[in-house]
Every structure is written in C-alpha cells, then in structure tokens.
Image (tube, rainbow, N blue to C red):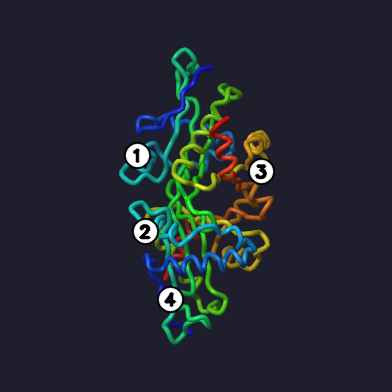
Amino acid sequence: MDFSIRAANVEDCKDITRMIMELAEYEKMSDHVKISQKDLEQDGFSKNPFFHGIIAEVPEQHKTKEGHTKVGYALYFYAYSSIKGRTIYMEDLYVMPEFRGKGIGKALMSKVAQLGLAAACAQLNFTVLDWNKSSRDFYFSQGCFNVTSDQGYHCMRCEGEALEHLAQP
Amino acid sequence: MANFILRKAESKDVSDILRLIKELAKFEEMEEQVILTEKDLLEDGFGDHPFYHCLVAEVPKEHQSSEGYTVIAFAMYYFTYDPWIGKLLYLEDFYVMQDFRGFGIGSQILKVLSETAVKTRCSSMHFIVAENNKCSIEFYKRRGAADLSYEEGWRLFAIDKEDLLKMTTK
C-alpha cells in the first residue's frame, strides 16, 4: 500500500489528538489523557516547541471509513544523556489497526532514527508496556534492548500534589 | 557544614560537571561508558539551543573537598513532553559528593527543581533509578514519587547508534 511519511504541521493537530486518544485506549489509559488539541498546537508548533511530530498519510482512495487519510504518527523530542550526550526520545509511535503490517510503523520509526542521527544523537529511547508483546517483539527485531530488564532502571514519576509539596519551602 | 549555595551552572562549570558525571557513573558501575567531553557539554548546554540545563551546589573555599573542589553536587535536567498531560521536567542526573551528603543539599536541589517544574507549567517530574539503588528509591518515594515500571508496567527501551544506522538503511 502506498503511504507517505512527512513532518507534522499545526494543521495535523486534530488528527494527532484523535490518534493520541486511540493509542491511549489501546494502552487502557484513556482516562489519563488531559491534553487538548489547543495544547498540542501551542506546545508543538510555537517558537520553542516541546516536541516534534511525524505523520504517515495514505492517498484518498485508501482512507478509512470515517474519511481519515492520516493513519499513523510518531512524536519525539531531543533529550540528553550525561553518559552519551545528545539522544532522541520517541514519545509515541502509533499506526491505526487496519493499516498495520504494511511497514508504516517501521517507516515512522526509521524517520525518527534518521532525524536523531542527523542531529548527532547517540541513542534513541522510548518506553513500552510490559504486556505489549507484539510491540516489544517488533522493537527487538529492530535491534532495541530492554534497559529496564537488562540494566535494572525503573521509570519514576513525581506529579500533582507530590510535586507541589516537594516545591514547598 | 550547612553553608552552600545552589545556582544555575555556567559555561565555566563544565569541567566540574563532567567530573561529577563520571563520579556518579562510577557509583552506578558505568564509568567506562561515559563518552561525553567538556567540549560536548559546552556546546550542548551553553549554545543557542541547549539540550540540557544544570544546577550546581557550591560550598565556600574553607569547606572544599579533599582534592580542592568547591562544586560538590549537580542536577542535570531538560524538558520533555507527554501527549496525555503536556510538559514534563526530566531529571537526567542528580548527585551529591559522598562527603557532602546528609546536609540537606540533595533535598534543596530537588526542591528547586520542583519549583522550576511548577513555575514552567510542568505536570510532572520524571527520572529513572536503578532498581538495586534502594536508598535512592526510598528517598524519592518518601517525597511522593511513584515507580511507573512497577506500578504501570513501563519498560525503558534503547537503541544505539549502530542499530539506528541499520534502521535508516533498511
């Protein structure tokens, strides 16, 4: 199937928001989504963006029954490792279920890898849920390794009240 | 020794920052993996588009370390994004030299970082900890941190340069 991969622009935020919700539902975490289309527009497409996006698009004749031609996306940003220097972090990677198995996910991830290498990044990082076996198998096949199980690193978070409390004098 | 100041790192601090990065890496048994140089740190942290920000803790000369250092702790952080909740502050490194622990320097650093997170409208502060580092995990949990790997099943994955290159040519 024919598809194209390109940098996201502000007009894509409506579809990105839609697909973020779809990915959250897949990860059984829809109630965690607090962000709006307006937040994405502001945070991703103003002077100092907090993230960048890539969109996978199919031609009109392959659009979904709801009429969508934007069928996959990746969100990434630049990060830093005190050991290796510049890194690229892939925050989201998603392809709508009916468009899977056609190389779109791989093409999106390859684009993130290319952008990372172009910016002199030494590593690409991302997280995966432990029950998501099909995604983990895909990533292993691309040469990724599981930092949590191999090196024992756990992802930690401090938010909401705990964060405010920590900020108290 | 309660006297210390916390300040934003400046370009002149890169030598101390690299020294502290290597000390922390040694503690995590990863010292030989540090390939960063002072030049990288200078370019990446103090150029037009910084990849990271840094806080350092400094003590007066009379309290310098046995090797003569006055910069005795640091935190390296940057801003990231979660498409569900928005901006986050990511704490990449956080280290206080052994002889200077127990004086509240670590707590003060975390406090300033949290203030920064709240002021810049971040929903959360994220970081990783090695599971065998029990005393750090307890330090963070006492301050309300949650272990996402344990509680929600998130696993951190990485792909190194060699495999990134392979991926772009497939």
Between B168 and B99, the residue placed more toward the observer is B168
Q: Residue furthest bottom?
A: B62
Q: In the rendered structure, which amino acid carries the disc numbered 1?
A: Phe
Between A142 and A56, the residue placed more toward the observer is A142
Gap in angstroms between the C-alphas marked 1 and 3: 32 Å
Hey, which quadrant is residue B31 in on the image? Answer: bottom right
Tags 3 and 2 both on a single chain: no
Q: Estimate how packed mark 4 is, as few (under 14), some (14 to 19) or many (20 or more) residues with alpha carbons within 10 Å.
A: many
Task: From the image, tell me which residue sits under label 1.
Answer: A45
Q: Tell me which label, 4 or 2, sits earlier in the chain.
A: 2
- Quarter that holds the N terminus of chain A: top right
Label 3: element kind: loop
Q: In the rendered structure, which amino acid carries the disc numbered 3?
A: Asp
Task: From the image, tell me which residue sits under label 2.
Answer: B46
What residue is rendered at 51% in x and 38% in y? A113
Q: Foreground mark, 4 or 2?
A: 2
